Amino acid sequence: MVATTNGSALRADWQHAARGASALAVGMGVGRFAYTPILPLMTAQAGLTASAGASLATANYVGNLAGALVGMLAPRLGRSVVLHRAALVLLVATLAAMPCATGVPWWFALRLLAGAASGVVFVFAANSVLGHLRDHLPGWGFSGVGAGIALSGAVVLVLRAAGNWRSAWIVMAVLGLVLAAAAWRLPPPPEPGGVVAAERPRTHRWFSALFVSYSLEGVGYIIAGTFLVAAIGQGSPGSLGAAAWVLVGLAAVPSSIGWAWLGRRWTRPGLLLAALLVQAVGIALPALSGGVVAALVAAVLFGATFLGVSTVALGTGTHLRFPRAVALLTAGYSAGQILGPLVVAPLLHHGYRPALVLGALIVFASAVAAALLRIGFPHEGPQ
């Protein structure tokens, strides 16, 4: 009887992880990052300029911040199954509407709404996975982001020869619909514990360093997350940029599981620092050294770290037991994503590579803040 009960519980945990992975795949991998490989197609076929492309990215990140703020300012809404499902429906609808719209203002509005829906789905799914699952299972949940990126990148890679930017968005909508259906029954996050303010552990010092680091990561990583495909394509012939984006997703799938496994052996601040330093190298590589090898190595390094940074940072916030840690960190990360395209917009007149250099420097600054997090960190849990 005990073995049967344990087996049922394990099966339920794996179903939970799979639904969480599906939610993160549609919310982040497709809803947010499908735009990255489609951007060159829209530039070539729909007349989208580099500055307009950056403004559409910014619109998505503004919406993402708004969605994350729901979980921070109204925690009950952030745990609402009804709101989560409404966000899934809205996200798929915005994907389906992109090929029907004409002109930057309409695309701007749709990417804004998609960002808001993504923010709601991310906070709900991340809190659900981190709140209910233990050991390596949260890593499997977060791997959905990488799977969504790989799938969306593979779609664009195929459609470069057999379709156009409109057909790419249509296929993304169908893919999003399938993933949303799989995520429909994701359990809500747990209710917060009833710890009074006087009994809460004093973790402000470490959380402040974590918040600064993760917010700077939002600025730096999104520069690569938005322009990496275009930057590689600018200096390389053929479909190398789209292929590199598929590789980013494939590297991201096992990365969150690997970082979660390492988290049981290394300290969280040390892991965060290592991931950020490796990511800074990966972002700078295609800007400083052209060619196929540099592009593919950069894709692997970026894919293997950007999701790991999120897994480790959000897990660290949960470990510190700081109130509304996931929503606060996601809000800072989202605000950083808004700034990223705006910061590099003046550099885009000189191509995409200077933007990647700046992004790498910002990620390095994030690593410096993560190094400060290591000082006196309560590894056994705050008291």
Image: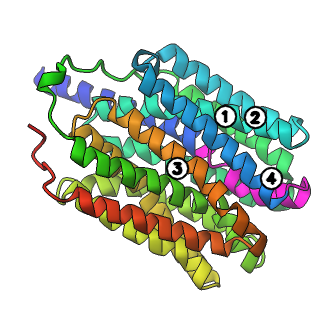
What secondary structure is marked by label 4? helix
Give how far across and how far down residue 1 sits, in percent: 12, 20
Give the residue at mark 1.
114
Q: Are marks 1 and 4 in contact (CB under 8 Å)?
A: no
Residue 307, compared with residue 383, is above or below; it is below
Q: Are marks 1 and 2 in contact (CB under 8 Å)?
A: yes
Q: Amino acid at mark 4?
A: Ala
Which circle, 3 or 1, is nearer the viewer?
3
Which circle, 3 or 2, is nearer the viewer?
3
Q: Please tell me which residue lies in front, 226 or 23.
A: 226
Q: Residue at x 26, y 25 (%)?
A: 8
Could you tell whether 9 is left or right of 57 in the image?
A: left
Of the numbered discs 3 and 2, the one sitting upstream in the chain is 2
Give the residue at mark 4.
52
Residue 37, compared with residue 278, is above or below; it is above
Q: Residue at x 30, y 30 (%)?
A: 131
Give the residue at mark 3.
336
Tell me the CA gap for discs 3 and 2: 21 Å
Residue 240, compared with residue 100, is above or below; it is below
